[in-house]
Structure formats: C-alpha cells, structure tokens
Amino acid sequence: MERLANHEAFEMEVLQWLRSKGLLRPLVFGGGTMLRLCHEMPRYSLDMDFWFYKEVEYDSFYHQLENLISQEYDVTDKQNESYSILVEIRKRAGMPKLKIEIRKSLAAGGSTEEKIAFSPHFATQVLVRGFTLSQMFKNKVSALLDRVEIRDAFDLEFLARRGVDLDLSQQDKEKIIERLHGFTKRDFSVKLGSVLLSEVRDYYNQQKFTYLEEKLTFDQWST
C-alpha cells in the first residue's frame, strides 16, 4: 500500500501544481480519483479525469498545458485527440507514471460544485471544481454498462451508501445487477482488492456487492 499512498501524494501534488498555474480554472474534476480525494472513498485510483466547465479553445489549452507541464515533470506521453487531451507524466525517469485525461466536452449546468481535495499522504488541501455525487452516479452507471469494470461497480456502491438517489430505469437496474453477477472471485481479490484500503478488502471478498444489489432490488419492488 505504500506504493499507492505515494502515488496519491503525487496526484495531490499535481492537483496543487495545476491550480497554481491556473489550469484548473476551466476544468471539472471527476472519476474515481475525485471520489477518493474529495469524498474519502476507500479505493485508490491511479489516474486523473477532468472535463471542461467553461468553454475554451481546446488546442490553445493543450499547448499551454504541454508547455508548462514539460517544465515541471517528465512527460512520457501526450496526445491532443478529437475527444480528449491525454498527458502522462512522472516525477523523473524510473518513477511511477500518472495519466491525466481531459475530455473535450462541457459539464452540464448544475452538475458541478466546489470541493476540497485532501489526502492523509499530503500536507496541503486543494480547492477544485468537481461533479456532484448525483452526476457522478450517472457517470458511473454509464461507465459500468459500457466497459464492465469492477471498480465502477465499487464506486456505485460507495455512492449508494452515501445516500445518492438511484434514479434509474427498470432496464438499467436489471443490467447493473447482471453486471454485478458477472464478476469473478479473482475480480474481487485481485483487480479490486489490490486498490482497496485494508479495512474494506475482506468485506468485499466475502460480501461482494450485496448492498448495491439489495438497494437496486428493493427499488424495483418499491416503484
């Protein structure tokens, strides 16, 4: 877990650096890393996901980011794609890499709010704009149905435990439950277990996503 803690400290360092350069102003923080750093989700996340909050000229933003970040970090990959900006960095050669992806799409009105990013592995807090938990639930539902990654199911259960309204169609509820039943023992022990905090790892190895499935099933019968 020391490796993951050090990586999280690096994520916080990069967030602070992005803010100091004014690069966070037009951005919305999302994804699992936002849930971890802003809402204490007990799962480590290894990359950083952003969307745009304000309209910008995407090519100009990419070139500004590329120029500034290359002065501070070792850039191992950079791409200005049609739908997103991708940058992969590390502190120096031989150190773990951090992938930053910025989608070239605007967040819907009312779907964001200011948040504080913090970590027990980093001394400073960082003010960010992130998606609301309700919007994160919608994002994670889409992700789970599209790519069937166990970490997305974990994030959905985390949001359900936080009291987010499971506002879903009957069809989507059934699809999610089908996805939950498809995860293997190895998915829980290795793919998910390797990024969970120790205090919840054993629980998910034994209980799987029982809580989320019960919530979805209860909601089916109550509608």
Image (tube, rainbow, N blue to C red):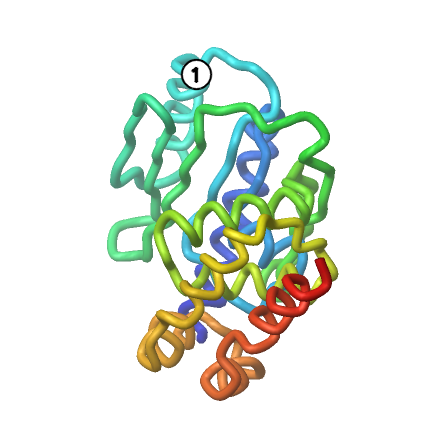
Which quadrant would the N terminus be assigned to in this image? bottom left
Q: Position of residue 100 (x, y in %)?
A: 41, 40
- Residues 50 and 214: in front is 214
Task: Name the residue: 34% across, 43% down.
Answer: 89
Q: Which residue is mark 1?
A: 58
- Residues 167 and 141: in front is 167
- Residues 216 and 49: in front is 216
- Residues 194 and 21: in front is 194
Q: Position of residue 142 (x, y in %)?
A: 47, 45
> Compared to 201, does 98 lie above or below?
above
> Compared to 93, does 18 lie above or below?
above
Q: Position of residue 180 (x, y in %)?
A: 44, 68
Q: Is residue 190 toward the left or the right of residue 166 in the image?
A: left
Task: Name the residue: 67% across, 57% down.
Answer: 39
> Compared to 186, does 170 lie above or below?
above
Element at label 1: helix
Tell me which amino acid carries mark 1: Tyr
Q: How many marks?
A: 1
Q: Is residue 198 toward the left or the right of residue 63 in the image?
A: right
Task: Name the residue: 51% across, 52% down.
Answer: 172
Q: Position of residue 134 (x, y in %)?
A: 68, 46
Q: Quadrant of residue 205?
A: bottom left
